[in-house]
Structure formats: structure tokens, C-alpha cells
Amino acid sequence: MCGIVGFTGKLQAGPILLDGLSKLEYRGYDSAGVAVRDGSEDPVVVKAKGRLSVLSAKIDGGTAIPGTCGIGHTRWATHGEPTEQNAHPHVSEDFLVVGVHNGIIENYQELKEKLIGNGYTFYSETDTEVAVKLIDYYYKKYKVGPIDALAKTMVRVRGSYALAVMFRDYPGEIYAARKDSPLILGVSEEGCFLASDVPAILKYTRNVCYIDNLEMARLTADKFEVYDLNGDVVRKPVKEITWDAEAAEKGGFRHFMLKEIHEQPHAVEATVNSAVKPAAQAEGLEAAPEKVRENADELLEIDLSACGLTEEIVKTVSSIWMIACGSAYHVGLAASYVIEDLAQIPVRCELASEFRYRKLMPGPETMAVIISQSGETADTLAALRKAKSLGIRTLAIVNVVGSSIAREADHVFYTLAGPEIAVATTKAYSAQLAACDILAMYFAKVRGTIGAERLQELLQEIRKVPGKIEKVLEDKERIQWFASKFAHMNDAFLIGRGLDSAVCMEGSLKIKEISYIHSEAYAAGELKHGTISLVEPGTLAIGVATQPAIYEKTLSNMVELKSRGAYLMGLTVYGHYAMEDTAAFTVYVPKTDPLFTANLAVIPLQLLGYYLAVNRGEDVDKPRNLAKSVTVE
Ligand code: F6R
């Protein structure tokens, strides 16, 4: 968690740091700070509790602190409350070292005691101040320069970190170090940049380089160098970011979340098109019989060559573990129904935070599917590493290119959702679900559990999903109206069976995390085993019933709630009009294959969460206590 930015070059650093931090505020927003140096002067450090705007007002948008070299930080508190004192940057006593940090130093207490024994004193409760003073200690003790002092610190600390540091003796230079927290470097004619994430520097450069674990960097006005722990220079490729900078801006929408909800047709379409192609384009079809090639325009194929998941590999897999956190875990839950149905392969879903400490016995042919938008979630990354240590094959479904999970997994299926800024995920969720659907179809095809005709039918249908999401979005005013009626409520219950229960889990999270209305998702048949006692006259209950085989069953469970006074909202597929006899308010989604209804049914629930939060005046894009990328355990 937390966002860090650094710049050294020809321009004033203050405004660049604030601009970069504003793009990283999704990573944490309880306090912020910058340190800017003017030539060889000591850095000026300014910090503020609260949103970035408070800091910006204090330093006139960055112009009040002259200097062309600086570092900045936006914080999501871990060690120590969100106060100005605990905000970064942190400094050593004589300003010899000034630093910002993202991550957690696990052995900071032990290190703090060691430093106290060596005469150091501490003004904050943070682990970062300990890290900064440890660097100061090694720098003074060994007198071997910044890279060596950093390397010695890295060997001594346990935990995760992305560190950006300035040394008083090295004006115009920034030093960085990384382990398990993201950090990228950028270069342009104006100078060099570092940041926790690409959007922070996209306005200034598209040429970036990813620092790997246990690597360090030195940035000067015209270049950067990366070093390994021995202090040897590591050659790094500079990659060009191809996204549109607009993609990381609000583009006329009131909130990023609403913009991203509307980007879902495109996110799903791009992800589907990356793997579902007209047969002629798919690898290997050059050798297909002429008749097949003649019809190639109508035929579709799955092409997963980009992630290296060959048919031979798939044939060896006999069970799947889906591992993720939060909404990505809900994708795994939904996908488990689709994969088991189509590919007839056992799927187990695990929360990454549980998986990493659980004793599990994979079969030799178990494959772990790791799902993550950011590719940096600490628990998910640890779970990936655990899966690898168990010797099983790993496939990551990831949105952020070059992220840690993407780099460490055996195979990567990139979702093409583009940058997601709102803390509550929407378009990444939808793109992940589409990727899982494709995976399910691919496994089914290779394992021979569905025939060629059914495969074509499903492939044609998945390509229609983006258009159908568009249709659901056209109905958003009804949801907006409904949300305005229910914005005052305290509780909501969502019920559904099978695939619908997974949709309920995600819908419930969307409602509670941004509107702060308590909501719970239940398998429809389970509510009567206890939780139904919470239902009172007027309680909102949302029944999701899109699966024809179990539609009637869910309806019966909805009736049970209605007879206890619940106000019912129904969510089903066009054609199931009997829902209106039971529910007071019904939302329909277009017909699709029942296995793909989750991709549509989630949209009204995202909209409901969004409009409830707007009606209650909550900060939709930055809900309290949360951060976009959870890089701590
Ligand atoms: C909720 C949400 C989170 C994330 C979770 C995993 O709206 O966004 O629950 O899904 O923190 O994050 P990633 O996908 O980055 O690993």
C-alpha cells in the first residue's frame, strides 16, 4: 500500500511530485508528504494529514518549494496512526538521509532497538523511520556510498518495501530499492522518474523500466542505473507503455468508478479478442483441411499461445485451484461453476490469505490459477510463491503488465482492462471473468468434454457479451432511481444459487465497500439456517436468479423473505417475467448462455453500489480504510 513518486531533472520537482501522487492516491490517502531539494541545499520536507489536497494547499501546488529533485508519498497507514508526524518522508537527524517507503518492515522493532543502542532517537511510530535511520547508520559506519548502504540495509530488513531515498551528500540524485512492492523507473528528456505505478509518470514519459526484487537504482537528471545486491550494474530493458494517457483520467465522468463501469464492454471485448479469434488467424490452422479453412470466417478458435498454455499442458491438468483476494476471489468462485460444468474438472477456490498458511496436498497434475488486477497483492503473491514451492504449475490472470505476479507465474493470461483507478474494481473483475470463461472453454475443448458445435456456440456467445453489457448499462437510470429510494437503508441481503451466489458475493461487496451499507451475500438455500432472523419488515433483499435450472428454487427462497416483510428486488434474465409476481422491483439482463450470465448480472449490482454511495455522499473512488493495491499482508 502507499504510493511513492520521485523526480530529478530540469523541471521543478514539487508540481511533478504532486501530480504523480494525485494519480497514486488510490493506493492510500490518509496523509501525504514531499521532500524537495534545491541544488545542494538540505531538502525541504512538507507533510500533511488527510487528502493530498491538504498538502497541495500547503505548498501552492508544489511551487512554494523550489528545487528540481524530490520524492513524495501518499500513505495508507500500517505502523502508526495517520498523523502528520507519521506521514512520509522520514528523515535522519541531520537530514543526511530522507526517504519514503511503501510496504512493511517486519523486523522493525528489533532494528529500532539496535539503533537506539547506537544512540538513535525516534520521533514517529513508523517502520519507515527505522529503515531511513538504518540506512543512515550503515552509510556512516562503512562510508562506502549510498548503494552499499542500501544493500546492507536490504540484507538486514525483513518484509516488503519500495524505498526512495535522497542523501545529503549527493545532490540531484535519488536512490531506490525494492522487494515485493512495485517500483518503476521512467526516463525522458526532462529527467528521471520513479513511481509505484505507471499512471503517476505517464504524463511525462512512456519509457519505463521495472525494478526487480532485491535490486536498487540510482537516478540522476539524465539517466538511471539499476544495481544488484552486490552493487553490480544490471542491464534493464526500457519498455514503452502503450496505453492512452486518457485511460487514466476521468474523461468527463463524475467518478473513476462510473467511467470504469462504462468501460466494461471494451475491457471484456479486448480480453476476449486477445484469445478468441477467427479460425484462420489461430495458430496451426494453416494445416487444417480445406473445408475448415473455407469456413474460417465463421469459425472461431481459442488461441492461448501468448500465455504458453499448450494443449499438451492442459491434457496433464486434472484439478485446478483458483487463488485470489476480494473481488478477484469472487471471479474464481464464479469461474469454478463454469469450469466444472464445461471441462468437468474439479476446481477448488482459495482465499490467498488462507491458502498461504494452509496445509494442502496438490496432486501432481494440479494447476493453480492466480487472479489479480494489480499483480501486486501481497497475499496473492505469497500464495503464488507457495504454489510454486509445492511444485505445481501456475497460471496468472493479471491486468497490470510487468507486475510481480505476472513476472513470477509460469504462464500469464493478461486481461486487457486498461488502468483501473477506482478502489472498487469493476472492469478488471469483468475482464477476469471473461478470461476465466475462455480458460473453461479451452479446457473443455482439449479434454473433449464439449463437442465442436457447442464450442462454436459458446465462442460466438462470449463475443456478444460486450454488446449485452452495453444494453445493461443503458438501463442504468432505473437503478439510479432505485438507489435514491434505498440510500437510507442499513442492511441488504443478496441471495442466489450456483453461479448466482458468486454474483451475489461480488454485488454485496460492491454495495458495502463504497456505500458503507451493511450487506451480506448468501446461498439462497442457506439463509433459513440462521441469518433469516435478521430480516425485518422493509429489509432489502435482492434475489439473483439467472440460472434456468434453479430459478424456481431461488424464487421460493425470495418468497420466504417476502413473507417476513423483506422488500424484494429481483435480478433475472429477460423472459423470466414471473419474477415480477414476487419482487417489488425487477431488473432484467439480456439472454445469454446461462454460463455467461454472471458477466451481465454483476453490472446492475455494481451500478447499485455506485449510486447508493453517491446518494449517501460518500467518496466513491476512495472509500474509507481501503486502498487499491493491498501490498501488505
Ligand atoms: C474490491 C476490490 C478488492 C480487490 C482485491 C484484490 O472492489 O477491488 O477486493 O479485488 O484487493 O486485488 P487484486 O485483484 O489487485 O489482487
Image (tube, rainbow, N blue to C red):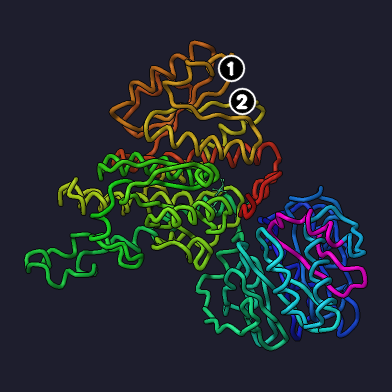
> Horizontal and vertical percent for residue 592?
30, 42
Q: Is residue 257 left or right of residue 336?
A: right
Relative vertical location of residue 6 with respect to residue 106 in this rendering, above or below: below
Contact between labelled residues 2 and 1, with CB atoms less than 8 Å apart: yes
Relative vertical location of residue 191 with respect to residue 487 in this rendering, above or below: below
Question: Residue sitting at 60 percent across and 40 percent down?
Answer: 611
Q: In the rendering, which numbered label is found on residue 146? A: none
Question: Residue sitting at 53 percent across and 64 percent down?
Answer: 403
Please state which amino acid type lies under the numbered disc 1: Leu
Give whichever of discs 1 and 2 has the lower sequence position. 2
| 592, 530: nearer the viewer | 530
Label 2, residues with CA under 10 Å away: few <14, some 14-19, many ≥20: some
Task: Choose top left, top right, bottom left or bottom right for residue 278.
Answer: bottom left
Look at the image and tell me whether residue 416 can be seen. Answer: yes
> Horizontal and vertical percent for residue 210?
57, 73
* Residues rendered magenta in the picture: 88-115
Question: Residue sitting at 52 percent across and 82 percent down?
Answer: 237
Residue at image mark 2: 491
Question: Residue sitting at 58 percent across and 36 percent down?
Answer: 511
Q: Is residue 92 inside the magenta stretch?
A: yes
Q: Is residue 522 left or right of residue 545?
A: right
Residue at image mark 1: 534
| 57, 513: nearer the viewer | 513
Please state which amino acid type lies under the numbered disc 2: Asp
Task: Choose top left, top right, bottom left or bottom right for residue 103.
Answer: bottom right
Question: What is the C-alpha distance between the residues marked 1 and 2?
Answer: 9 Å
Q: Is residue 299 left or right of residue 382?
A: left
